[in-house]
Amino acid sequence: MLEDFYPVRWVGGNAIVTLPGHIGASDAGQVRDALLSVINLGAVTLIADMTATVSCDHAGADAVVRAWQRTVSSGTGLRLVVTTFPVRVSLTL
């Protein structure tokens, strides 16, 4: 179940997925699957809450990019909530 890994809160058609403090090679697949699962459940907007995320390596950034690609093809909106500069840089690259 999705909530076993990352909490999901639904507000109408919007899904808020709370992501972990560190996203790397060891859990990037779970992050990707969690985000894609919410999209597949029909979220109008997916909000990836990365306020607790302090590090995100290439694998983690790739997981977010994969979710973004799916949102583009499905018409789902995507919002990232990022508060740390290193994570912002990682996602920008």
Image (tube, helix red, strand yellow):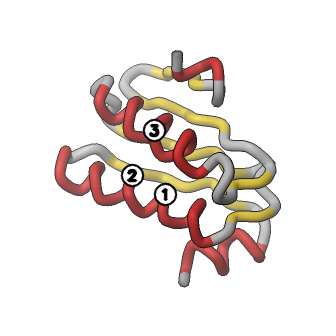
Q: Are marks 3 and 1 in contact (CB under 8 Å)?
A: no
Identified at 57% across, 25% down, the residue is: 8
Q: Is residue 3 left or right of residue 14?
A: right
Mark 3 lies on residue: 33
Q: Is residue 43 above or below residue 93?
A: above
* First of labels 3, 1 by sequence position: 3
Element marked by disc 2: helix
Q: Which mark is residue 80?
A: none
Q: Which mark is residue 64?
A: 1
Which percent across, then down, holds residue 10? Answer: 50, 21
3D distance between C-alphas at marks 3 and 1: 10 Å
**Residue type, numbered disc 2:** Ala
Q: Residue furthest front?
A: 26
Give whichever of 35, 30 is nearer the camera: 30
Which percent across, then down, holds residue 92? Answer: 55, 80
Q: Quadrant of residue 44?
A: top left
Q: Quadrant of residue 9?
A: top right
Which percent across, then down, holds residue 79? Answer: 48, 52
Identified at 34% across, 48% down, the residue is: 77
Element marked by disc 3: helix
Q: Quadrant of the C terminus?
A: bottom right
Element marked by disc 1: helix
Q: Quadrant of residue 58?
A: bottom right
Q: Are marks 2 and 1 in contact (CB under 8 Å)?
A: yes
Identified at 77% across, 64% down, the residue is: 55
Which percent across, then down, holds residue 60? Answer: 59, 60
**Residue type, numbered disc 1:** Val
Mark 2 lies on residue: 67
Q: Is residue 90 above or below residue 43?
A: below
Identified at 76% across, 75% down, the residue is: 86
